[in-house]
Each structure stands twice: as structure tokens, then as C-alpha cells.
Amino acid sequence: MLVNRKMFDTVEAILRENGSIKRFENECGEIKGRMMITMTDIPEGIAVEERDSKAPVAFEASFDFYDSTVGLAIYTTDRQLATGLWVTPQEDGAEAPAEDWVEFFIKTLVTHIAEDGSFGVPIYSFVNDTCDMTVVPELPETD
């Protein structure tokens, strides 16, 4: 389940209203699933590769078709992993996300981290059998 379904629904409503989802579905087919990437805390017991630079940032992906999240911590300035992956069940007996969805999470996250290490969250992905439409908040301009 998505970690914040209400927020995701709000973004989806805006995208439906402005025609973005209709264009995507006309070109690529019906949306079959949703993924949301948010920041999180590194769980206790997860080993972190220590570095002298900034602390790593922990992210997690939640899906509307799994009842578990998958997380990782990364040094955003060079996109290097600081931890291994972890899976957190959202309810008893929840299935872990399949490997292809874990890979999609990592690819989506890394793709949306800027060269300077900046990023926007939450990241919203609408997916079907062939492609995705991913929406990332714009970062404010800095002087």
C-alpha cells in the first residue's frame, strides 16, 4: 500500500484534470500500478557505510500492489549506496516486492537525483506493462 494514499490521490487528480494522465494512457496504455518514493529513517540493525562527507539519505518505495515497502540509503552527491536494501512489511504476512520492482525503484530514484545531489520528494510513478510516467516536485531555485 502507498505510504500516503491521500497525497498520491491528490497528485493523480491534478494530473487527470490537466490531461497528463489521459495523454500518457493514450500513448502507452492504461495505468496498472503506482509507486511512491519518500524519505524515511534507516531502521535499527541496518549497517551503514560510513564516510567523511554528508550523511546518507534514506528512501523507501511503496506500491499500491504490495503491502511492503523497500528501502535503501544513498549518498546523493555521488549516488553511492550506503546500505543494502531492506524490506518492511506493512501488514502481517505481506509479500516482499519482486526484484523487477526493486530495480525499478532504484533506477527511478537514481535517475531523479541531480548531479549536485539535490532531489525532490515524494516521487510519484504511474506504471503499466511497458513504461511509466514519473512526477517529481521541482526544486526551488537557489542563488
Image (spheres, rainbow, N blue to C red):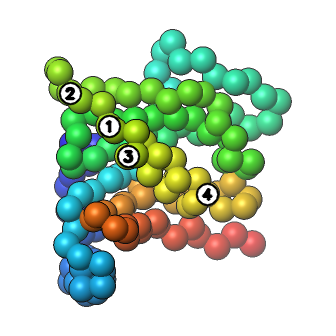
Which circle marks residue 113 in the picture?
4
Q: Amino acid at mark 4?
A: Ile
Asked if 82 appears above or below 113 in the picture, the reply is above
Cα distance in 3D space between marks 2 and 4: 29 Å
- Of 4 and 33, which appears nearest the observer? 33
CB-based contact (under 8 Å), mark 4 and mark 1: no
Q: Nearer the viewer, residue 118 or 31?
A: 31
Mark 1 neighbour density, 10 Å: few (under 14) some (14–19) many (20 or more) = many
Please, what is the three-letter code of the amino acid marked with disc 1? Pro
Q: Residue at x 34, y 27 (%)?
A: 88
Q: Are marks 2 and 4 in contact (CB under 8 Å)?
A: no
Mark 2 neighbour density, 10 Å: few (under 14) some (14–19) many (20 or more) = few
Q: Nearer the viewer, mark 2 or mark 4?
A: 2
Furthest residue in direction right, as rendered = 52
Give neighbour class at mark 3: few <14, some 14-19, many 20+ (Cα, 10 Å): some
Task: Find the distance from the CA under tag 1 to the CA under tag 2.
Answer: 9 Å
Residue at the spot x=78%, y=28% of the render? Answer: 51
* Helix, strand or loop under label 2: loop
Q: Which mark is residue 9?
A: none
Residue 1's x, y, as percent?
Answer: 21, 42
Badge nearest the viewer, 4 or 1: 1
Which numbered disc flags the more N-terminal residue, 2 or 4?
2
Spatial CA distance of label 4 from label 1 is 22 Å
Residue 104: image location, x then y, percent:
44, 51
User: Element under label 4?
Assistant: loop
Q: Amino acid at mark 3?
A: Trp
Inspect this view and state whether residue 78 appears: yes
Residue under pointer 2: 94
Distance from Cα at disc 1 to Cα at disc 3: 6 Å
Which residue is labeled 3 in the image?
A: 101
The residue at which mark 1 appears reads as 97
